[in-house]
């Protein structure tokens, strides 16, 4: 007997929730609805000029792909090594390993819209923990 085909995901018009770092989140693929087993996928949106909260993830690895807009991203390794800032634009991708501190600043006048995948699937808001450092105070 074959397994049923999982349903397709679709972004909602309104955000499903606001992430711990401040992004608008639209869920696309998740275990409890679309039946994915090892990751989850969402669309994250930041308003122009928005600066997220500096956080780290306890266990998940997160990968980002920029669809629209530009950003500065601060990342600090889990071992306390030197932090770095990278600029991202459409068509570029970035990985946030488990435990890395990170913070996002949406640049320019266009919203920042990214496709985000987490592995294992996103467990909930307690996954993100505030960290010191970064690009400054959250704004926007």
Image (spheres, rainbow, N blue to C red):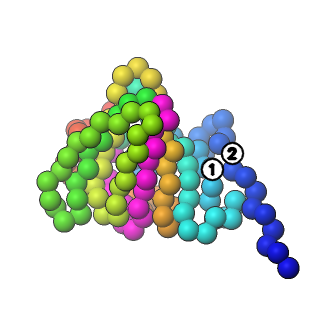
Instruction: Where is residue 81? Give x, y as percent.
Output: 14, 59
- Residue 25 in the image: above or below residue 97: above
Question: Foreground residue, 63 or 124?
Answer: 63
For label 1, count other residues whose C-alpha is less than 10 Å away and answer few (under 14), some (14-19) or many (20+). Answer: some
For label 2, the SS is loop
Residue at 42% in and 56% down: 62
Q: Name the N-terminal-most of marks 1 and 2.
A: 2
- Front-most of 136 and 7? 7
* Residue 71: mark in rendering: none
Residue linked to disc 1: 28
Magenta residues span 53-68
Dot 1 and dot 2 residues touching (CB under 8 Å): yes
Is 30 a magenta residue? Answer: no
As drawn, 13 above or below 123: above
| Mark 1–mark 2 distance (CA, rounded to whole Å) | 5 Å
Q: Would residue 23 be found to the left or right of residue 6 on screen?
A: left
- Local crowd size for mark 2, using a 10 Å CA cut-off: few (<14), some (14–19), many (≥20): few
Q: Which residue is drawn at 22% across and 54% down?
A: 76
Image quadrant assignment for residue 38: bottom right
Q: Does the magenta stretch include residue 61?
A: yes
Residue 75 percent location from the top left of the image: 26, 50
Left or right for 138, reference 64: left
Q: Residue 79: horizontal and vertical position, in percent?
A: 19, 65
- Furthest-top residue in this view: 109
Residue 3, can we see it?
yes
| Residue 10, disc | 2
Q: In this view, does 115 lie above or below 99?
A: above
Query: Mark 1 falls on what kind of element?
Result: strand
């Amino acid at each position: 007997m074959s397994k049923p085909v999982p349903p397709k995901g679709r972004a909602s018009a309104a955000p499903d929730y606001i992430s711990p770092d401040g992004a608008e989140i639209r869920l696309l693929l998740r275990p409890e609805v679309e039946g994915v087993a090892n990751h989850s996928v969402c669309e994250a949106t930041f308003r122009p000029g928005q600066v997220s909260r500096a956080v780290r993830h306890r266990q998940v690895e997160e990968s980002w792909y920029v669809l629209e807009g530009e950003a500065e991203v601060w990342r600090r390794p889990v071992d306390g090594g030197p932090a770095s800032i990278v600029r991202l634009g459409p068509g570029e991708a970035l990985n946030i390993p488990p435990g890395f501190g990170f913070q996002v600043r949406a640049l320019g006048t266009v919203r920042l819209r990214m496709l985000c995948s987490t592995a294992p699937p996103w467990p909930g808001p307690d996954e993100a923990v505030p960290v010191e450092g970064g690009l400054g105070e959250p704004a926007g």
